[in-house]
Amino acid sequence: MIKENATGSRESRVCSFAAELVVVGGGLSGTCCAITAARAGITVILVQDRPVLGGNASSEVRLWVLGATSHMGNNNRWAREGGVLDELLLENLYRNPEGNALIFDTILLEKVIEEPNITLLLNTAVYETRKEGDSIRSVKGFCSQNQTHYELTAPLFCDASGDGIMAFQSGAAFRMGAESKEEFGEKFAPTEEYGELLGHSIYFYSKDIGKPVRFIPPSYALKDITKIPRYRQFNSKDFGPWLWWLEYGGRLDTIHESEQIKWELWKVVYGVWDHIKNSGQFPEAENLTLEWVGHIPGKRESRRFEGDHILIQQDIIEQRDHYDAVAFGGWSIDLHPADGVFSEKPGCNQWHSKGVYQIPYRCMYSRNIDNLFLAGRIISSSHVAFGSSRVMATCAHVGQAVGMAAALCTKERMHPRALSAPERIGSLQQSLLRMGQHIPKLALSDGLELISSASIKASSHLVLQALPPDGPLLPLVQSAAQLLPLKKGKVPAFTVWVKAAKDTVLTIQCRTSSKPDNHTPDVLLAEHMVNVNKGTHELNLNFDTSMPEAAYAFVCFLKNEDVLLQYSNHRVTGLVSVFNKINAAVSNYGKQDPKDDIGVEGFEFWTPQRRPNGLNIAMNILGGIDLFGVDNLTNGVQRPTRQPNAWVADLADTNPSVVMDWNEKKKIRSIELFFDTDFDHPLESVLLTHPETVIPFCVRNYRILDANGNLIREIRDNHQTVNKIEVEEARGLSGLIIELEHPEENIPAALFQLIVK
Ligand SMILES: Cc1cc2nc3c(=O)[nH]c(=O)nc-3n(C[C@H](O)[C@H](O)[C@H](O)COP(=O)(O)OP(=O)(O)OC[C@H]3O[C@@H](n4cnc5c(N)ncnc54)[C@H](O)[C@@H]3O)c2cc1C
């Protein structure tokens, strides 16, 4: 029994912890930062003011994780981010293809608590920051659940808290609101009338309970739905992230007036639900109940802290190169009217670039606080560039870069800025590439020494002669194209199959991208107008043109409703079909066509279909495409870019294998394999369901053997991109054999990279 006498006052308990890195904020950026740093060998304290991790992706807010794949609605091919985030999203796909936000919470929590280097403090809000000179010395947090103050000390800190509580208190330079057009020459900079800040949103989810259910709104619900100019868009089906435009607060102080904004949003949400349930306009909503309403608003924008580089519109649109690129983005520049749900204007104004863009490391640390990293939406960017970099997969990718940077700074006893030096930044880039973080235009070279010194032979490799015509005939209601990787030089001749309902002229083009790493077909190389008579035909196409450099070609079949095009059931790593179609969710109306001079480019969107659709267009390729050789395993690129970058086995090979031979014994401690988990496919974490739990291209079963055929390890049911196999007691081996099973009947086994250490 505890019994204390009356006293004047008491102090709450204080616990002091020290680590090599303190991360404030457990959104996706903070979580991915902490995991990356911990795996790279440093001790981390992750402080999160809420009961679960994930920030806006958690079950408390329920946004779906988006990034450069942009719902598959723009021209960024194979653009899923990679690294820890990818591991989380693939795990979520495996366990939770239905997109239940609660399951995603458990995955984030599991991955964090499995890291022995991480001390996780949940329900702990950081409220005070102490400094010594220009460095942060410690922060204080309070957990109301256990009435404990925490004093957290570290040589390095990362602010991933969204509003930047620690960065703000430390005196780091920041901005809030929009820059003028003149400041950085950003032609898309908004006017004051449009607004300078994005507002908050609160989501609701509804559920059919199979019997009528009534709704009596709280007294504070919005009574007059016509106050929302776009109220006619409401229906009984849309909920959750589809109603992202229930937005408010862009004209207020999105930090200090956050509670006021939240009340207004609750008013809106319950008013909208009252309209759906009780206006009489939606009889189909009779059995629907409110399953969940957010208690915490999702915050879009507040402070952005200044680093040594401020990311701007031109970095995104021109896809500028940066010597210190460590992450990338690819969401559109997506600004919203500050009046949000009460605005007459469209809910968003989105403009895409022709491909993904690099994010420099210099955006990820404070320019005036020596030991402060920045991650998430607060990184150093203009308001316009933030419109793109703010999505969660991009935030997480930045977080990973920061986590790795913190580990390197710890090992070298450096401050964040020192690592940005041109002679040092390579170590960060290489360490990131090593863990599967894609950085556009960069290739891994570190760690490939051992594998590059081996003689590597494969049991077979694909020479793509044909995508057999064993799939459906589908109408050419939208222009369709097959992406094919080609070498510089002559474009091969093709045979395709069509069926015409009547005599017609079919336009077939060969296009490529003006930038070889992009997949926007903005360069017309050749065009044929082919007379097709009624009936089924084999068309032989010889474009008589050349690829200016190694890149993807687009064999385009322009829309013709009288024509059916023959597809193939065969899928191959690095091949995809695309369609000149609309995806209104990301402001893709087939073509981006800026009417005003807003500093963005006009181009067509050619985008893939989600599986189970999205078959390749059947064709024979004269001479075949010979780009899937075993040499790809050591080229340092782990996904298709301007070329497929994968070793792909021949589907007829019954035991696809790679054999490495060193002529002498090498001490081998680990083998890392990078499989194809289709970086083209977005893995939204909630609401949008997925047709599969394992990406079809991913090799599930494989065996690793020594040169004499003795089994070292057998893996079954893999669903992850990166597999690291530790070799017990670091064995001396003169060779290795990797035997893979084709993942599916119509998909050959593929591997992007092998690292042997
Ligand atoms: C309504 C809405 C719709 C959006 N739509 C999408 C979308 O569909 N897809 C997408 O990818 N992005 C979307 N975004 C953008 C995206 O959600 C944010 O930009 C992103 O979440 C920012 O990531 P973050 O890690 O910086 O912040 P957050 O996700 O907000 O995470 C920050 C974390 O820090 C914690 N924290 C804050 N203060 C403290 C403190 N003092 N102490 C300890 N912890 C603290 C918070 O609890 C939070 O968990 C949307 C944003 C909003 C608001």
Image: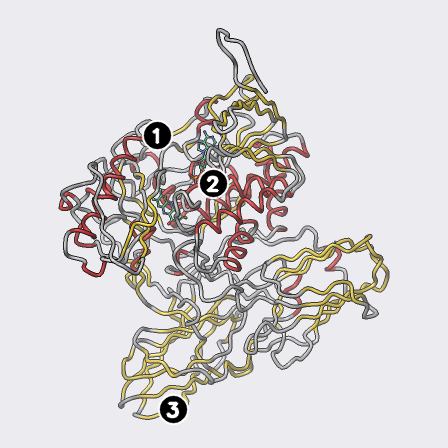
Looking at the image, residue 104 sits to the left or right of residue 702; the answer is: left
For label 2, being within 8 Å of ligand 1 is answered yes
Q: Badge 1 local density, few (<14 within 10 Å), some, or many (20+)?
A: some
Residue of label 2: 27
Q: Which of labels 3 and 1 is toward the front?
A: 1
Amino acid type, label 3: His
Residue of label 3: 537
Q: Earlier in the sequence, mark 1 or mark 2?
A: 2
Q: Secondary structure at mark 3?
A: strand
Amino acid type, label 1: Ile
Would you say the residues marked 3 and 1 are in contact, meaning their CB atoms lie under 8 Å apart? no
372, 221: nearer the viewer? 221
Q: How far separated are the C-alphas under marks 3 and 1?
A: 64 Å
Residue at 60% across, 32% down? 21
Q: Badge 3 local density, few (<14 within 10 Å), some, or many (20+)?
A: few
Would you say the residues marked 1 and 2 are in contact, meaning their CB atoms lie under 8 Å apart? no
448, 216: nearer the viewer? 216
Residue of label 1: 255
Q: Earlier in the sequence, mark 2 or mark 3?
A: 2
Residue at 68% across, 74% down? 656
Seen in the picture, residue 146 relative to 268 is either above or below; the reply is: above
Residue at 13% across, 46% down? 226
Amino acid type, label 2: Gly
